[in-house]
Amino acid sequence: MGRISKIAVFTIFSNTMLFLFVVLTIQNSKITKKIDFLNFQTVPLPISFIISSSFIIGSISGSLLASQIKKSNPKLH
């Protein structure tokens, strides 16, 4: 397995574990908000879930983007 593949697998695994931990810990959260996106609105979600899921999605996409940049430009290794 290549270096980039190991980094991607580690990132996805660690962020999945973090997401499961967040889901288990915010079950009794009372403060909720709705997210408005274009003309759509979500169900009320706990604020901690919104913040942590945004962080996790950013972490995964940033890691995968960085690995693709390194893959396309070998001088960055």
Image: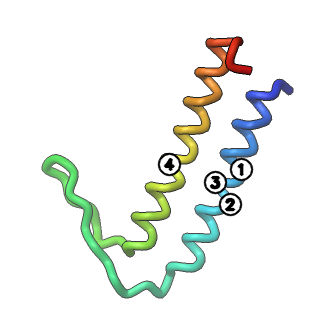
* Nearer the observer, 73 or 64: 73
* Residue 22: percent from left, percent from top: 57, 70
User: Looking at the picture, which amino acid does disc 1 mark?
Assistant: Phe
> For mark 4, does the 10 Å Cα neighbourhood hold few (<14), some (14 to 19), or many (20 or more) residues?
some
| Lateral position of residue 69 relative to residue 6, left or right | left
Residue 34 is situated, as x and y percent measured from the top left of the image, at: 25, 68
Which residue in the protein does label 2 denote? 17
- Helix, strand, or loop for circle 4? helix
> Residue beneath label 4, please?
57
Residue at left offset 71%, top offset 50%? 13
For label 3, the SS is helix
- Give the CA separation, mark 4 to mark 1: 13 Å
Query: What amino acid does circle 2 point to?
Result: Met
Label 3 environment density (alpha carbons within 10 Å; few <14, some 14–19, many ≥20): some
Residue at horizontal 28 percent and vertical 67 percent from the top: 43
Question: What is the quadrant of residue 17 in the picture?
Answer: bottom right
Q: Earlier in the sequence, mark 3 or mark 4?
A: 3
Q: Which residue is mark 1?
A: 13
Vertical placement of residue 37 versus 29, above or below: above
Q: Quadrant of the C terminus?
A: top right
The earlier-in-sequence mark between 4 and 2 is 2
Residue 40 location, x and y as percent? Answer: 19, 53
SS type, badge 1: helix
Three-letter amino acid code of the residue under disc 4: Ile
Label 3 and label 4: CA atoms lie apart by 8 Å
CB-based contact (under 8 Å), mark 2 and mark 1: yes
Q: Which mark is residue 15?
A: 3
Q: Are marks 2 and 3 in contact (CB under 8 Å)?
A: yes
